[in-house]
Image (spheres, rainbow, N blue to C red):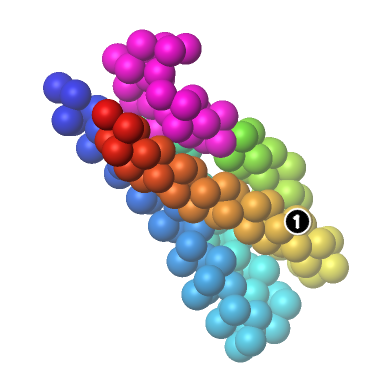
């Protein structure tokens, strides 16, 4: 059972962090270089429409499986890296919720109204926040692997 919980946790991380990495490092620079604002903003609204439901599923999986594993590790007496992962993960979830309920909604309204200036501003906010979340996601992965290695070396 524990292996299935771990698998679901890792799959959630792969979908979310991998999706952010692809969007930020590959799709964003190409879209900015080859598309005019109306097409670029329409593309991003469509991409987020497809990606964000998967992020919600990932958030739920990561949170539920993470809390389950934390309880298995002993709750507050869990290894420091596990508690750090929880803090970083919750911060990422809060940032994503803000993106979803604020600038993403603004982007969708702006694209529907063909208000490209407002859409560009909303997309700029999303870009910055996804950059922060991507950095936090990569940091979280590093914390886990370094933390587990240090724990293994200690004992």
Q: Residue at x 27, y 29 (%)?
A: 155
Image position, residue 59 (x, y; %): 46, 35
Residue 74 sits inside the magenta stretch: yes
- Binning the other alpha carbons within 10 Å of mark 1 as few (below 14), some (14 to 19) or many (20 upward) gives some
Residue 80 relative to residue 92: left or right:
left
Q: In the rendered view, would you say 11 is above or below 122?
A: above
Question: At 67% from the left edge and 61% from the top edge, which residue is drawn?
Answer: 127
Kindly identify which residue carries mark 1. 125
**Lateral position of residue 96 relative to residue 102, left or right:** left
Q: Residue furthest right?
A: 117
Q: Main secondary structure of the magenta part?
A: helix
Question: Residue at left 32%, top 42%?
Answer: 149
- Most extreme residue toward the bottom, as rendered? 34
Residue 118 pos. (x, y %) = 83, 61
Determine whether, in the image, residue 125 is placed left or right of residue 66.
right
The quarter of the picture where the N terminus appears is top left
Is residue 123 in view?
yes
Which residue is pictured at 81% across the width and 62% down the height?
121
Q: In this picture, is 129 found above or below 77?
A: below
Residue 67 forms part of the magenta stretch: yes
For this rendering, which residue is in front, 115 or 60?
A: 60
Q: Is residue 14 left or right of residue 117?
A: left
Classify mark 1: helix, strand or loop: helix
Q: Which residues are magenta?
A: 62-89
């Amino acid at each position: 059972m524990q292996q299935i919980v771990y698998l679901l946790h890792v799959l959630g991380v792969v979908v979310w962090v991998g999706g952010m990495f692809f969007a930020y490092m590959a799709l964003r620079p190409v879209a900015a270089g080859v598309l005019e604002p109306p097409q670029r903003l329409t593309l991003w609204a469509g991409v987020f429409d497809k990606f964000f439901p998967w992020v919600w599923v990932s958030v739920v999986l990561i949170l539920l499986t993470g809390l389950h594993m934390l309880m298995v590790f002993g709750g507050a007496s869990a290894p420091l890296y596990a508690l750090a992962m929880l803090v970083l993960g919750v911060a990422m979830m809060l940032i994503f919720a803000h993106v979803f309920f604020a600038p993403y909604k603004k982007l969708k309204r702006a694209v529907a109204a063909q208000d490209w200036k407002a859409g560009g501003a909303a997309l700029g906010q999303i870009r910055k926040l996804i950059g922060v979340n991507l950095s936090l996601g990569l940091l979280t992965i590093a914390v886990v692997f370094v933390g587990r290695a240090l724990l293994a070396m200690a004992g």
